[in-house]
Amino acid sequence: MSQIILAEPSVKLPPTQAELPCDDGIPMETQRHKMQMDILIDTLWPWLESRSDGYVSGNMFVYFSLEQVKNQDFRGPDFFAVLGVPKTERRSWVVWEEGKPPDVVIELLSDSTASQDKNEKKLIYQNLLRVPEYFWFDPFNPDDLAGFYLNRGLYQPIAPNAENQLVSQSLGLALVRWQGTYRGVDTTWLRWQTLDQKLLPTSQEMVEAERQNTEKERQNTEKERQIAEQAQQRAEQAETQLRQITVSLFQKGMTLEEIAKLTGLKTSEVQSIVYTQQSL
């Protein structure tokens, strides 16, 4: 009986995300950069909850070419979002596994990265990754904000709309500059907003909104209780006055029937009030 020997496959399969490096040990530029990345990610996650698909992350390696592995070019965008993909945890974003690049990429500029983000990286996202929309923002210079969309293979500027929003057609959301406090830092932040100008809330804002709703419900309940209590007091006062009038009329010589007709009470009710008063 002859033995069948399986030949080794001649085509080497590309590495998976489990096999690729996912950490270079290099922290983000500053605390402000980290917080800006967090506010973009944390506000988008709840929005994705309404969908059955989608993924958002930041400061994660994005692999689109085996040359990256060869050259140890592992750095990824500060923020990216993808629709039409399963909601699952990833170590890195590997295009040949996912079947598509990110839909939206945002780079946070700094003195040391601005030139690269505006030139080299922009060309990589345009020519190699083919990212449909690319934005950059400087957390320490909010005026330096720009967006681009891929049109026939080239990035074209995204012009602000009438509400001064930079609209992401991929997500159906907009990016806006927002002056406010996030995690104790009061500055101008880049935030997601709906097209009808409603900010996607942070976790702190959602907790505060829930607290305010609870307090509003408590106040409404207390107001309803006070209204009911006041109505009860008025009813008791009216009943007391009616009893006093009934007794007074009886003492003035009116008959039970006459008092009943005048007060709208039943004769038996008038009789009960009068007899109760006489027994005191």
Image (cartoon, rainbow, N blue to C red):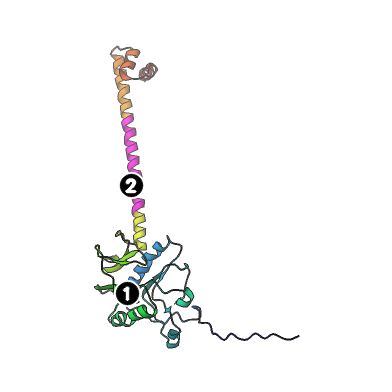
Decide if residue 186 is in sight here.
no
Q: Which residue lies at the image location 34% right of the left edge and 64% below the top edge?
A: 173
- 179 relative to 13, above or below: above
Q: Is residue 122 magenta?
A: no
Q: Is residue 24 left or right of residue 165?
A: right
Q: Residue 103: x and y, percent?
A: 39, 71
Q: Residue 5: x and y, percent?
A: 67, 86
Dot 2 falls on a residue whose secondary structure is: helix
Q: Is residue 229 magenta?
A: yes
Could you say which disc has been placed on residue 219 in the image?
2
Which segment did they paint magenta? 212-235
Q: Residue 45: x and y, percent?
A: 40, 65
Could you say which disc has been placed on residue 70 in the image?
none
Q: Is residue 66 left or right of residue 115?
A: right
Q: Is residue 109 left or right of residue 65?
A: left
- Disc 1 from disc 2: Cα separation: 40 Å
- 179 relative to 259, above or below: below
Q: Residue 237's image quarter?
A: top left
Instruction: Please tell me whether the stretch drawn in magenta is mainly helix, strand or loop.
Output: helix
Decide if residue 227 is in sight here.
yes
Q: Amino acid at mark 2?
A: Gln
Dot 1 falls on a residue whose secondary structure is: helix
